[in-house]
Amino acid sequence: MSPLRPHRPLPLATPAGVEVLTRILTQGPIPRVEIARRTGLSQAAVTKAVAPLIEAGFVTDQAAAPVDNAGQLAMVGIGRPVSPLTVVPHSVSIIGLKVTPTALIGVTTDFTAGIRNVSHRALPSTDAQTVIEQLTDLAKELIATLKNDAAVAGPVIGIGVSVSGDVDERHGVVRDSPFMGWREVPLAELLGRRLKLPIVVTNDVRALTVAEHWFGVGVDADSFAVVTIGSGIGCGLYINGEVVSGAYGVSGELGHLPLAPGNLVCTCGRRGCVETVASSDAILNRIRKSTKQPKLDLAGAIKLAHDGDEHARESFDQAGEVIGSALAAMVNLVGPELVVIAGEGVAEYDLYEDRMRQAFGEHAFGAAGDCRLMLRSHTFDDWARGAAATVIRAYVRGEPPLQR
């Protein structure tokens, strides 16, 4: 089976089929009876939806049945061993690409968003034409790795690309990305011409939220938020059964809430944004200036703060105060049960965690303060995996550009 084949249609004829496959993909291995219980469908309807997926090789019921405490096969009904359904990971392959101002990160994944191959590539500039050429080369490199693994890698169904900023996901246009210096770049169209594959372009934080929804903490959560802290600050929201996109494609811009001093100018051109105080770049620049060490890197700034430097500690405290206040504002508005605070090295920012939690507690209203805050470090590979997850979601749901 050639990984270059651009599309392998899923045999899903009804919304019930989509729901059943989604349950198997995100919660499997899972018995038919449990899918019926969670979806409200009859077991006969579940079996009808699953049969063509098994026949086409997307799903299998051959996983080992669980055993009870006595070592016997678990039973459903009388004399019927459980046959849990699970997705066949290698039935398809997906490519995920993450764009940053200095590098491109690419991964190949299977149908469950499990990473198979990783490739990083430095960017000589943020010029859109240059980045598109580099993305094309990186995607072709990753496709070649799949060709070499053709025995265990299914056909490529699409390529996901995640970029910071305001992204029109439906049309694949990057409307405004301050970090990249892009405005109105038709990224999906330009890449699609070169690669002849479906291209899904999305905001990077939203892509990370999709990955958490389908394959991470969101699988068992009714509502959650993902807040990312790095050169910028972003927020993805999962509320009422869906990742929030916003009426105009913009939502969750936590980093641009006006909670910082108004004399500070953000990279977006506005004043007083959270990012002007709480992004890693803002923290580092402030410590460089206050300590008169213009070549200091972030690791050095963290060490200074841990060693008790007054200026460095103050910068992290101020960041924690503003982040905690921003989190409280978001939680007061939408009420998620969990907030995952993620980013490259975010777990090392223990310097502001106490102040962040204190500010959150001071400003969270009533029971909103019960929302759990979880710090978790992410790598750039995780961002690229998020882009791949958006392709998987579009593929299962039959959304553009992977309509059935």
Image: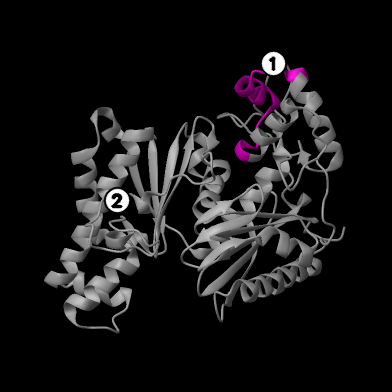
Residue 310 higher or lower than 68, as above or below: below
Determine the secondary structure under disc 2: loop
Q: Amino acid at mark 1?
A: Gly
Of residues 93 and 130, the one drawn nearer to the viewer in this rendering = 130
Residue 210 seen in render: yes
Q: Is 247 left, or right, of 199 in this rendering?
A: left
Residue 102 higher or lower than 236, as above or below: below
Which portion, as a residue range, is magenta?
26-44
- Classify residue 198 by image quadrant: bottom right
Mark sitting on residue 77: 1
Of residues 378 and 165, the one drawn nearer to the viewer in this rendering = 165
Residue at 52% in and 68% down = 100
Q: Main secondary structure of the magenta part?
A: helix
Residue 39 among those drawn in magenta: yes
Q: Residues within 10 Å of mark 1 (few under 14, many from 20)?
A: few
Of residues 159 and 11, the one drawn nearer to the viewer in this rendering = 159
